[in-house]
Structure formats: C-alpha cells, structure tokens
Amino acid sequence: MQNEAVRKSVPRPARQAARQATRQAARRNRIKAHKRCLQLYILIAIPVILVIVFGYIPMAGNIIAFQDYSVRKGFLGSDFVGLKYFEQFLNLPIFFDIVRNTLILSLYGLVAGFPFPILLALGFNEIKSPRVKKFSQTITYAPYFISTVVIVGILQSVFSYRFGIVNEAVKLFGGAPIDFMGGVQYFRHLYVWSNIWQGAGYSAVLYIAALSGIDTSLYEAATIDGATRLQRVWYIDIPGILPTIVITLIMSTGSILNVGFEKVFLMQNPANYSVSEIISTYVYKVGVKQAQFGYSTAISLFNSAVNFVFLFATNAIAKRCSDTSLF
C-alpha cells in the first residue's frame, strides 16, 4: 500500500524516464555481454554456415524428384510430374529385392557390429598399464584410416579364388579353392565383418570418453565392498555409458538404409549381384550412368523418408523405456 502511494506520488514523466533509463541500461549490458562473446560467436558461425551451405541449401534440389528434370530447362522450367518416379520405383520388379538386401546388410552390420566398440572400450578401461593401453588403442584405431579401395584390395588378396591367402592354405591341405568374393553366401559376411574390423576401434573412442567421466570414487567404494572386476563393469561401467549407448543406437537405427555405397560397389560382381544390389548402388546406376536425375532423387528421398520414420520410432521407444532420447 505504501509502495503504491509512493509510486503515485512520482510524476508520470519521471516514471517513464526511469523505465526508459532501465531499458537502456539493460540494452547496454546485453551489448557488452555480446561483445565479450564475440569470438565465441565467430567460432560457432563457421560450422553453422558450413551446415547451411552444404546441408540445408542442397535440400532445395529435392524438387527434381517431382519433376521431369532437364539440365537445359533447370529447376523452374522442368515439367512437374508429381509422384511418378516414386510409383515407378515402388513398381520396380526388383524393388523388394533391393530393399531386402539393404535391410539385411544394414541390420546384420548393426546387430553384429554394435557391441564390439562397447566391449573394446570396456576392455581398454580395465588395462592398467598406460603403454599397453595406448598401444592397444592404436592397433584397433589404425584400420579406420585405410581407404575403402585398399580394404577391398586386402579382401581380394586374402580371399581371392585364384591367388588368395586363404585359398592357398586350403589348397595346401588338399582342399578345393572357394570363391569367397563371388559366392552369394559369403558376400554379406565379408562386408560386415571387414567393416567391424575397420571401424570398431574408432567407434570405441566415444565410449572410452564416456567411461573417463565416471566418478572414480564409485570404483573405490565397490572395491572396498569386495566387488569383482566383472561386477564393477556390470554395475558401474555399463550404467555409466548407457546414455551414450542409447543415443548411438538411435542414430544408427536412424540411418538403417544408408548402407555405404563405395565398398558394396567395389565388391559387387555378376556372381553376387542378387545379394549385393542395394538402394545406393541402384541410385548410382540410374542417376550417374543413365542420367535419370529425377528418378534417382526420388529414390534417395524415399530412402531418407524411411530413415526419418525409423529415427522417430526408435527415439520414441528409447524415450519410453529410458530417460535418454534425442528429443
């Protein structure tokens, strides 16, 4: 009541001037705060601009999935055809074969390869010697830097029908050589397990970083209570990195149809075509070789839409089953 009386006793122009001064002071403080963070803004602006230029602006090109695109006519001059190319892909005689091959290859790689980085990280975390730990990490990390072409060349050298190391050993023991690279039953195994060998060490770095953030007092308390090494891993390490595991699983499931093009294409041959033809290799053939730009863009857009659905579904399940999710 007293404050209200004091406020009314102050002339209205004075109150307006006080409010204006307060706003100006707040604005000056905001400007000073922005100036102090100017270097941080510049640092953030660089990746933001790169994402906009190379991530969002190219999305405008998806319009050609609904056009009979002509390079001469351009985006604005090409004829609109609606969902023609989507229907063409869905009615493709080998549509289900392509999608099935993509899903099998991706799910096989996810199920077989997802636990290995976690196991590697848990193993490295238990190594006490810094030298042994660094050496082991380097050995498992190094294959990631080998190019895809070299990896396929290594596979050829090891599993080739005519001069591969494995077949030379088979012939040495009196057996008949096996066509690993051309055999339909071997293609998926070679692709997936060579990927695991190449990428497990690199993927383990994320879990190693998560393990390093676990409070060491938990290990000390568990040791005092008589917990074994396996019990410490089960009750401290795994719960500590569980949020990282969930986020990684969601991201992996969200790209379920994005099987790497280069390696499959290099390993592909007429003998294993029935299991090696996937969405990305088919897009390359119709888009680059046959110059069907609208059709190939429609297939890629369909691929992205399916991945989008998988991402949201997996995120919803993770959110319901745990406290960790992307959004």
Image (cartoon, grey):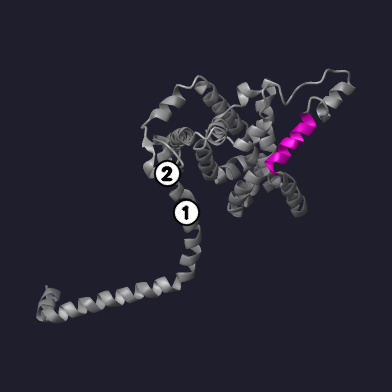
Q: Which x, y percent locates residue 20?
A: 22, 77
Q: Quadrant of the C terminus?
A: top left
Using residue 22 as the reference point, say whether residue 132 is left or right of it.
right
User: Residue 166 magenta-drawn?
Assistant: no
Q: Residues within 10 Å of mark 2 (few under 14, many from 20)?
A: few
- Of residue 141 and residue 158, the one placed in the foreground of this image is 158
| Span colored in magenta | 147-159
- The residue shown at (42%, 73%) is 35
Helix, strand or loop status at disc 2: helix
Q: Which of 205/43 is in front?
A: 43
Label 1 sits on a secondary structure element that is helix
Residue 14, picture quadrant:
bottom left
Badge 1 is on which residue? 53
Which of these two is toward me, 136 or 202? 202
Percent across and percent down for residue 298 are 45, 34
Q: Is residue 98 above or below residue 71?
A: above
- Considering every residue shown, the one lying at the far front of the view is 72
Which residue is labeled 2 in the image?
74
Q: Nearer the viewer, mark 2 or mark 1?
A: 2
Residue plotted at (71% across, 23% down): 182
Mark 2: amino acid = Gly
Earlier residue among tags 2 and 1: 1
Between the residue at mark 2 and the residue at mark 1, the CA separation in whole angstroms equals 20 Å
What's the amino acid at mark 1?
A: Val
Could one spot residue 228 in this view of the protein? Answer: no
Does the rendering let one see residue 230?
yes
Q: Residues within 10 Å of mark 1 (few under 14, many from 20)?
A: few
Q: Are marks 2 and 1 in contact (CB under 8 Å)?
A: no
Q: Position of residue 232 (x, y in %)?
A: 63, 43
**Along the viewing direction, whichever of 115 and 219 lies nearer the viewer:** 115
